[in-house]
Amino acid sequence: MVVSEIMAQQTPVARVVGPWTTWMDHWPSPGHLAVEPPGAAVAAWGRLGYPRRALRLHEAASRMVERHGGEVPADLAALESLPGFGRYTAAAVFSFAFGGRAPVLDTNVRRVLARVEDAVEFPPTSASAGEWRRAGEWVGVLEGTPGAPEPALWAVASMELGALVCTARTPACALCPLQSDCAWVGAGRPRYAGPPRRTQAWHGTDRQCRGVLLDVVRRADADGLAVDASRLLAGWADADQARRCLDGLAADGLVRVGPDGVRL
């Protein structure tokens, strides 16, 4: 559960299935992962993107071994304290793995609640404290709240509603079970009037450059080899950008630059 949630952060689930299966075959428990060097986690991460998540997952496994007997903690506060666990990830693990009552507020759920209650097409860029509080009211954060749904059932139902019906571009309002109670539908489905919603660029960015450099190092590492730094940098058209990105990868602990070259 923990591995799948971390891998699925900002990554489509379809891309996660293969790496997740391989990962779990190698490291079925936090203890199995914690004894490996961090570079092994980065190598196994492949091309999922945002490879710092691999390091945070390794750190989280080590923390679980040190403080929780090698088990994933069943306490929400303990989950939130783990490296790489934001509020959403901790709540998702708490809800799905342990049946805990906590709001699981992802992009899809935020969009559903913004339309149903606020009559707006899209919520703000970042989740506010008010959105978390409202989501908690819907799921019934307190045990025994009259009519409160099962927390995991609420989480998966609301997420799937946003992913499959109340979608960002082509919402299927005629199929939505909340249509008659939706403030946005009642207001005539007004178009979004907030700040421009920019999609994240990729081509030519530092993110792309870092990914290219890291992939070269990863493939060499699989053969037990280091990559000559000058040869690695020459593989990217913008030399200054390549040097900056290599320095960033080293600072983040994703690669090691030594006299023999660059390694994981």
Image (cartoon, rainbow, N blue to C red):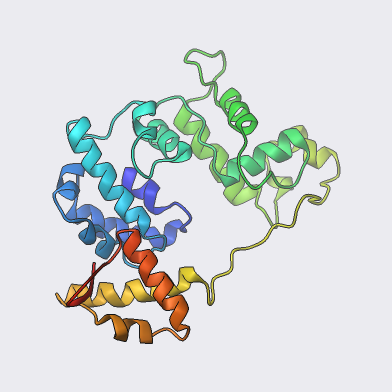
Task: Tell me where residue 100 sits by quadrant.
Answer: top left
* Most foreground residue, 179 or 231: 231
The residue positioned farthest toward the right in the image shown: 188
Residue 130 drawn at (x, y percent): 64, 30
Residue 193 drawn at (x, y percent): 81, 50
Residue 195 drawn at (x, y percent): 75, 53
Q: Is residue 141 visible?
A: yes
Quadrant into which the C terminus falls: bottom left
Q: Is 56 on the left-hand or right-hand side of 208?
A: left
> In the rendered view, would you say 32 is above or below 205?
above
> In the rendered view, would you say 175 is above or below 128?
below
Q: Is 144 on the left-hand or right-hand side of 69?
A: right
* Most foreground residue, 35 or 263: 263
Quadrant into which the N terminus falls: top left
Q: Is 106 on the left-hand or right-hand side of 29?
A: right
> In the rendered view, would you say 132 is above or below 198?
above
Residue 51 drawn at (x, y percent): 36, 60
User: Which residue is painted at 70% across and 39% down in the image?
Assistant: 114
> In the rendered view, would you say 23 is above or below 30?
below
User: Which residue is painted at 60% across and 31% down in the image?
Assistant: 129
User: Which residue is painted at 54% across and 43% down in the image?
Assistant: 106
